[in-house]
Amino acid sequence: MANLKSSKKDVRRSEKRRIENSQRKTALRTFSKNIVKSIKAGKKEEALKLFSQFTSLLDKAAKKNIIHKKNADRNKSRFSAKINSLK
């Protein structure tokens, strides 16, 4: 356990950040799964609505270094291609 006051504060800060980051990652995975479900069901409009929210979350996560920028770009590209392939 940390002894210095600043070290104790750093532990509190990093724990808070860890929780926030895990919540953001969980939200990304949930949106991803929901988009895949709507694509498999053939619901293009619903997929597009989810995709716009998903891209916003991806960009924010990449900006805060929760995920890598190229990871966010790759996800956006793959999902947009899948959505555009729907009739």
Image (cartoon, rainbow, N blue to C red):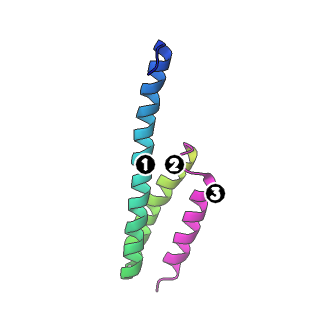
Does 66 lie within the magenta span? yes
User: In 3D space, how far apart are the residues under numbered discs 2 and 1 (Cα atoms)?
Assistant: 7 Å
Find numbered disc 3 in the image and state the secondary structure of the residue it sits on.
Answer: helix
Mark 3 residue crowding within 10 angstroms, few (<14) / some (14–19) / many (20+): few
Residue visible at 60% across and 51% down in the picture: 68
Number of marks: 3
Circles 1 and 3: CB distance less than 8 Å? no
| On screen, residue 84 above or below 53 | below
The answer to which of 62 and 6 lies nearer the viewer is: 6
Amino acid residing under circle 3: Lys
Residue 24 numbered tag: 1
Magenta-highlighted residues: 64-87
Q: Quadrant of the N terminus?
A: top left
Mark 1 residue crowding within 10 angstroms, few (<14) / some (14–19) / many (20+): some
Lower position in the chain sequence, tag 2 or tag 3: 2
Residue indicated by mark 3: 70
Q: Residue 59, how many percent across, how many down?
A: 54, 52
Residue indicated by mark 2: 61
Q: Picture quarter containing residue 32?
A: bottom left
Q: Picture quarter containing residue 63?
A: top right
Find numbered disc 1 in the image and state the secondary structure of the residue it sits on.
Answer: helix
Residue visible at 38% across and 60% down in the picture: 30
Amino acid residing under circle 1: Arg
Find numbered disc 2 in the image and state the secondary structure of the residue it sits on.
Answer: helix
User: In 3D space, how far apart are the residues under numbered discs 1 and 3 (Cα atoms)?
Assistant: 17 Å
| On screen, residue 81 above or below 55 | below
Decide whether the magenta segment is chiefly helix, strand or loop.
helix
